[in-house]
Amino acid sequence: MAIDIDDLAEKLVRARNEGKPLDSLVPAGTEGTVRDAFRIQQEVIRQQVSAGDQVVGFKLGNIAKAMQSKFGVGQPDFGYLLASQFYPENLSLSEANFIEPFVELEPAFVLKGPLGGAHVTVADVISATDYVLPSLEIIDSRIKDWKIDIFETLADCGSTGGIILGGQPRQLSQLNLADTAGEIRINGEVVAEGNTSEIYGSPVSAIMWLCRRVSEFGVEFQKGDVILPGSCLAAVRLSSNSHVTGSFAGWGDVSFEYEAAE
């Protein structure tokens, strides 16, 4: 069965807007490629930008083995980040905004110059980085019960639900992101632990990998873009009326309240 890019994109946008997941994205036996899935994602983004949103960055997901094991997707995904997906720290988010969310911890890179191409190096990533911030990413699939493979999550923009950036910027030279411990606490209890070394050895290397991977689709990043390299720990399911905090050792915290829908 042929892939209908426009139809599948409209289904994902509708599921996102209505908060009602799809039983499946395509019928069983449909053969879709990674390129097909990314074309669907680009159409989803085009529709949302046409409706008034704005692309402000890009993400890499499932780069850590802990994340691949969590959701059974054996390769990394990636996707555009929209301005509407960013929420302030230390404030409340309603569960009404999400379907079946999980939260993960990662450093966020903010660029001071363009970055991209098939031959990007770690040095290029370092040179293009203005500063990094602690961040929490909420992932939220528009496919019911997270029944996904790489095709579904890639078409669904890397299953992004929301991003909370912490207000504690650091230069890369002030941190050792090849070896920084991180944890997530919910209502004061540690529920997940990890290390930035799990992000492809270093988040800087993960962004190098991302640049090279998406270059085949003509994607390059621009000054001011927020780039997420992936979680350093296994994502944690969110439940209502929770105080969620992500912490990086020697760096800082980022928090939000996850409240029941009214």
Image (cartoon, rainbow, N blue to C red):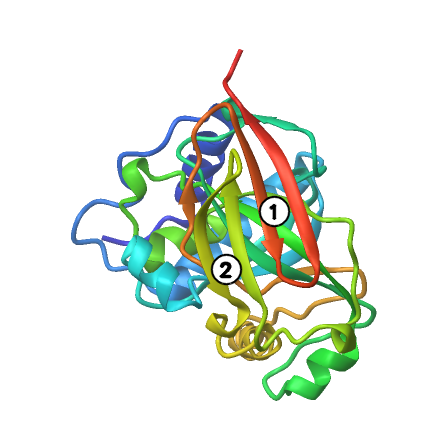
Instruction: Identify which amino acid the numbered label 2 is placed on.
Output: Ser
Q: Nearer the viewer, residue 191 or 196?
A: 191
Q: Residue 196, percent across and down?
A: 54, 69
What residue is rendered at 47% in x and 62% in y? 194
Seen at 67% across and 56% down, the residue is 134
Question: Mark 1 = which residue?
Answer: 46
Q: Earlier in the sequence, mark 2 or mark 1?
A: 1
Residue at 51% x, 76% y: name it.
Answer: 213
Q: Secondary structure at mark 1?
A: helix
Give the quarter of the image for residue 65: bottom left
Q: Amino acid at mark 1?
A: Arg
| Count of numbered labels shown in the rendering | 2
Mark carried by residue 231: 2
Numbered badge on residue 130: none
Q: Is residue 78 above or below residue 126?
A: above
Q: Position of residue 219 (x, y in %)?
A: 62, 69
Q: Where 144 sits versus 184, above or below? A: above
Left-right relation of 82 to 3: right
Q: CA distance from mark 2 to mark 1?
A: 26 Å
Q: Is residue 137 found left or right of 73 in the rendered image?
A: right
- Depicted 74 relative to depicted 135: above or below: below
Give yes or no for contact between labels 2 and 1 (Cβ–Cβ under 8 Å).
no
Q: In this view of the protein, which residue sits in the foreground, 1 or 71?
A: 71
Crowd rating for badge 2 (residues with CA inside 10 Å; few <14, some 14–19, many 20+): many
User: Residue 22: where, in percent of width, then height?
Assistant: 33, 34
Vertical arrangement, residue 148 with respect to residue 73, above or below: above
